Image (tube, coloured by chain):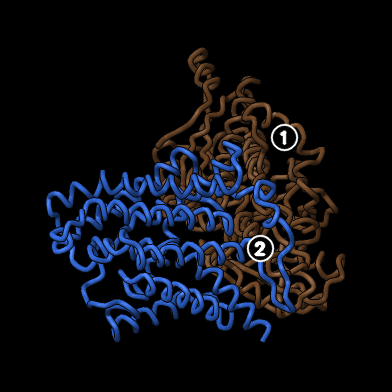
Chain colours: A brown, B blue
Amino acid sequence: MRKLLCGTLMAAMALSASAQTVKIGWFGPETGDSALWGQAELATVQMMAADYNAKGGITVGAKKYKVEIVAYDDKGDSVEAVNVTKRLISQDKVVAIVGAQGSGEAIPVAPIVNEAKVPLVASTATNPKVTVSDSGAVNPYVFRACFTDPYQGKVAAYFASQKLGKKKAAIFMTIDDPYSTGLSQYFKENFEKAGGKVVCEVSYTSGEKDFRAPLTKIKASNPDVIFIPAYYNDVALASKQARDLGIKQLLLGGDGWPSDNLISLAGKSLEGCLFINHLDMDGAAAKPMRDEYKAKYNKNAELNSYMVHDALAMVVDAIGRAKSINSVEIQKALTTCDLQGITGHIKIGPNHDPVGKEAWLIKIVGPDMKFQEKFSTAN
Amino acid sequence: MDQFFQQLVNGLSIGSIYALMAVGYSLVYSIMNFSNFAHGSVIMLGAYFGFYALTLLGLPFTVAFIIAAFGTAAVAVILERLAYKPLRDRRAPFLYFIITAMGASIFIDNSVIATIGPTPKTFPPPLLPAFLQGDPLEWGALTIGRIDLTIFVVAAICLVLLMIFIDFTKLGKAIQATAYNMKASALMGINPNFVIILVFAIGGGLAGVAGVLYGMKYQVFPQMSAITLKSFIAAVFGGLGSLPGALLGAVLLALIETFVSGYLSTQYRDLFAFIILIGMLVVRPSGIMGKDAEDKA
């Protein structure tokens, strides 16, 4: 169950037994449907820890600490996420946690880290309720490196209505996934505010493979653009089936789309389609990490690699500024986080979300994902 | 009206896959009187056989298809020999067969997850025959995907051949006789062991065809076997043990699903499908075309 540590780290610890270590927890799906992203995150944090340690560790006041990543698989399951978080805190005594990529896992974990006073920096959990609980109070110990769904929905609606001049939109969402339904709602609100009209809203249940019936409904409503806030695998199935039904309209998506597998699964059906991402994965800012990751693992870094990179960078930065490895001190430093990450400028606002973080519009051209333009607004 | 016909086409294209899968359940049930829940896993293996014959071995599409069908026929027969025959020899209760089938299914699924991994795969379009690569066929406002049309035709050919085999050949008659009464037909010189192997081979072969077609239409992934449970429901709906029943059940279930999700909402789809199924079983416990009212486990 407990997997951790690169071989280099083990060797380093054996050599200098006197070196002090700071434990940082990670959890995410190493198995299950979103295993691809969880494995990419784990590979990234392990790579980063090895890099920090190769330089003698991270600086805390006058001392240097080696970084030890304690990692657990949450299988993309909320119950499992709660269990492993409790274990990270009580058994492994980590000073901070990164990961929690899905909002479905990050939300139930929030009360636990609040009570234990151990900060959590979520990588890609975009639902607003991750940092602000149902009662409207900010979760003091939960932060995130990504922008939120309301922001993403707003950006998508802005692009569709203002930049692309689309008047009628259809929405195809996953009815049992709060990420998808939430993003749909924010898209609809903002699209209609901008003068557009949502002419058709249909859905499917996760795990389904045949979308022809709801897609036929969309076809009959004859929209200008179809918004699909779903994950890459379903997007690939939906786009293929849409093209098979003779739906030729532009498909627009969110940050569930970017994956190395998207285009190989979707074939030509997504040619020219657009989605909102957290960064330009082929851009200059991502290049050093992209190259290092590729050299080390012989795989392309996923979106989650970059996101968890920034999440861990936020924790390390906070430890440096707090000059302490005390969890409460790290939390205080995180509230004033203001750093340039790979995915953009991360300035933590009063709701513990990055304020004014840029969203990137990416276009699918042949086998590539080509950056189009950036957009940022007040949250 | 355009939408109605489009949904009809959608429903028939799903129905033809359900039918190919459902006859496998029905064939085995007619002889052995138990539901072979490992059938879905054999279908999944068929999709992987076809996928790797095409991508790894680089074989032509039709050859890959045939390899998948023979491969799954072999798997189904091996499964019967290893898992079910020992139970038959000991005259174990039918419940044991079902539990063994479920165990075999979990074993096969997890073997694939452990070795190949859970990530879905898609048949690379350039490796498919030229006919399948073009734009969808349009007929007025009606659009039919090339793969959907192919699936319908292949499924129809397979099922017609199967019906001819069962009704007009000596071996087919042997299967019918064994299904009617295994002991009496054994006394008449029909070897029940041979018939059972034959039935598993046919069901397995059709599973391979269904698996490759399903993989082409959607994706190839280890959880496929769970999705084939829908076809089991179709077989029960039509009357387990009856081939025409399995066909009818499959097409009806697919049409109900498609029209409910097309005209109402996807959320109501399974709700309606299962209400109709339960209603059907209350009124006619043996399904639409089933003959006797034994329990369908």
* Same chain assignment for discs 1 and 2: no
Residue A325 position within the rendered picture, expressed as x and y whole percent measured from the top left = 55, 34
Looking at the image, is mark 1 or mark 2 nearer the viewer? Answer: 2
Q: Using the image, determine if residue A8 lies above or below residue A308.
A: above
Residue A222 position within the rendered picture, expressed as x and y whole percent measured from the top left = 76, 78
Label 2 secondary element = helix
Which of the 4 image quadrants contains residue A320?
A: top right
Q: Residue furthest top?
A: A15
Which of the 4 image quadrants contains residue B150?
A: bottom right
Q: Nearer the viewer, residue A247 or A88?
A: A247
Residue type at numbered disc 2: Arg
Q: Using the image, determine if residue A353 lies above or below residue A190.
A: above
User: Around disc 1, counting alpha carbons within 10 Å, would you say few (fewer than 14), some (14 to 19), or many (20 or more)?
Assistant: many
Q: Nearer the viewer, residue A145 or B221?
A: B221
Residue B141 position within the rendered picture, expressed as x and y whole percent measured from the top left = 73, 78
Residue A290: mark: 1
Horizontal side, residue B270 vs residue B154: left or right: left
Mark 1 belongs to chain? A
Residue drawn at x 67%, y 60% as measured from the top left: A240
Residue drawn at x 67%, y 31% as measured from the top left: A293
Residue drawn at x 37%, y 45% as measured from the top left: B74
Whether residue A197 is visible here, answered yes or no, is yes
The residue that label 2 is drawn on is B146
Please state, as top left, top right, bottom left or bottom right, where the C terminus of chain B lies in the image: bottom left
Q: Using the image, determine if residue B123 lies above or below residue B188.
A: above
Q: Do the residues labelled 1 and 2 touch (CB within 8 Å)?
A: no
Q: Which of A15 and B115 is in front in this view?
A: B115
Residue type at numbered disc 1: Arg
Say how many tags the image has.
2
Please state, as top left, top right, bottom left or bottom right, where the N terminus of chain B lies in the image: bottom right
Q: Which of B67 and A29 is in front in this view?
A: B67
